[in-house]
Image (cartoon, rainbow, N blue to C red):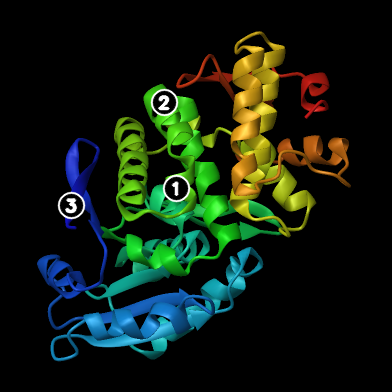
């Protein structure tokens, strides 16, 4: 199982997304990028290090690479400047220079933090992504968005910085716990809802195979998700237009994440945000009753939340007004004009928001 997609940036080929079911090709891919006899710093977290840290080190030829590994505490609460400080200190101590390579081994938090460090350390060093969660394999590892949270606000400090390679080993999903797997499915659903009705229908038809993590089903699902994101980010790499559609479910979702102090996973909040956006779309007569209830109920088999309790709607609305997607005081909502067709709306009233 070896397959790849190339992602372009500003009209030129930039990096490959490589699909596999093992790490055996990792050393070859690193060498093809030109990092023979260079230092490699693997950045990972406390969840992934014991599972795959040694496997990835073993896959990299020690005779041609000097490999270092840095581990930080897992979780969104560690996606901050303190962790960045610790990584910078590690890189400096081990004399990592501009010609060396950073590897982000982990989920979305690891990828975002490592990418941000790569973008800013020595004014830019190369990095590659080895995403280990469904969410990171289908979404956060592709497109060059990097960043950290600041004072609890999601991704407030960051940069657009492209990886040299995204290496997706789908076999690592076998060790992913059910809650994290479901969290990733919320992002997968997003692609069908905003861009591809046929993919949305395929997801409906393959719920049980997806739940069972059948290899060929996962490969198609992950590859199609990456294809859709590739198409969007190639047209709009810096989110000046169409890329904003990828924020479907995130406006409300990010506010819920902060309001609940990150006790809910990102994908769980995206599910809630997607249902909210679908509900507002239904209120505006943009989608049918049937479409709205089908969208809401599709999250149920994965035990994703479809309602949230013990939360102040006014607080969520206030947090949305601090969202980085605000433009001159206007909040941009991504709504649905049908399954597979998302649009940007700027006329969502607080009354509509308070019904979510």
In this rendered view, identify the residue nearer to me: 256 or 39.
256
The secondary element bearing badge 1 is classed as: helix
Residue 220 visible in the current orientation: yes
Does 141 appear above or below 50? above
Residue 32 point in image, percent of width and height: 10, 66
In this rendered view, identify the residue nearer to me: 18 or 109.
18
Q: Residue at x 26, y 69 (%)?
A: 22
* Mark 1 / mark 3, whichever is N-terminal: 3
> Distance of mark 1 from mark 2, alpha carbons?
20 Å
Left or right for 334, reference 340: right
The secondary element bearing badge 3 is classed as: strand
Does 132 appear above or below 96? above
Q: Residues within 10 Å of mark 3 (few under 14, many from 20)?
A: few
> Distance of mark 2 from mark 3, alpha carbons?
23 Å
Left or right for 136, reference 356: left
Which residue was labeled with disc 2?
A: 195
Q: Residue at x 44, y 85 (%)?
A: 90
Circle 1 or circle 3, nearest the eye:
1
Which residue was labeled with disc 1?
A: 210
Residue 197 point in image, percent of width and height: 42, 23
Looking at the image, which residue sits at the far top? 285
Which residue was labeled with disc 3?
A: 3
């Amino acid at each position: 199982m070896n397959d790849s997609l190339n992602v372009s940036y500003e009209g030129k080929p930039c990096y490959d997304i490589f699909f596999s079911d093992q790490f055996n090709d990792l050393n070859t891919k690193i060498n093809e990028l030109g990092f023979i006899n260079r230092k490699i710093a693997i950045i990972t977290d406390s969840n992934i290090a014991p599972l795959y840290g040694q496997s990835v080190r073993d896959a990299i030829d020690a005779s041609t690479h000097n490999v270092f590994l840095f581990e930080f505490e897992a979780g969104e609460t560690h996606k901050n400047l303190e962790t960045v400080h610790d990584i910078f200190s590690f890189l400096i101590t081990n004399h990592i220079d501009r010609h060396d390579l950073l590897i982000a081994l982990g989920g979305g938090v690891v990828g975002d933090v490592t990418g941000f460090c790569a973008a800013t350390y020595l004014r830019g060093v190369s990095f590659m992504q080895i995403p280990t969660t469904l969410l990171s394999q289908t979404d956060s590892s592709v497109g060059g968005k990097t960043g950290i949270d600041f004072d609890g606000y999601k991704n407030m400090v960051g940069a657009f910085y492209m990886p040299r390679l995204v290496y997706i080993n789908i076999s690592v999903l076998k060790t992913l716990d059910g809650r994290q797997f479901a969290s990733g499915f919320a992002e997968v659903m997003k692609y069908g809802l905003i861009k591809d009705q046929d993919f949305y229908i395929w997801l409906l038809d393959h719920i049980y195979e997806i739940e069972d993590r059948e290899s060929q089903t996962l490969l198609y699902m992950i590859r199609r998700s990456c294809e859709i994101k590739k198409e969007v980010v190639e047209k709009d790499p810096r989110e000046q237009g169409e890329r904003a559609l990828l924020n479907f479910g995130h406006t409300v979702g990010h506010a819920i994440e902060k309001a609940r102090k990150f006790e809910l996973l990102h994908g769980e909040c995206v599910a809630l945000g997607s249902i909210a956006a679908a509900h507002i779309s239904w209120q505006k007569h943009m989608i049918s009753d049937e479409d709205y209830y089908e969208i809401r109920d599709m999250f149920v088999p994965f035990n994703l939340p479809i309602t949230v309790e013990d939360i102040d709607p006014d607080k969520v609305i206030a947090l949305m007004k601090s969202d980085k997607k605000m433009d001159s005081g206007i909040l941009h909502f991504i709504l649905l004009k049908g399954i597979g067709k998302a649009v940007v709306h700027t006329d969502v009233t607080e009354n509509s928001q308070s019904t979510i």
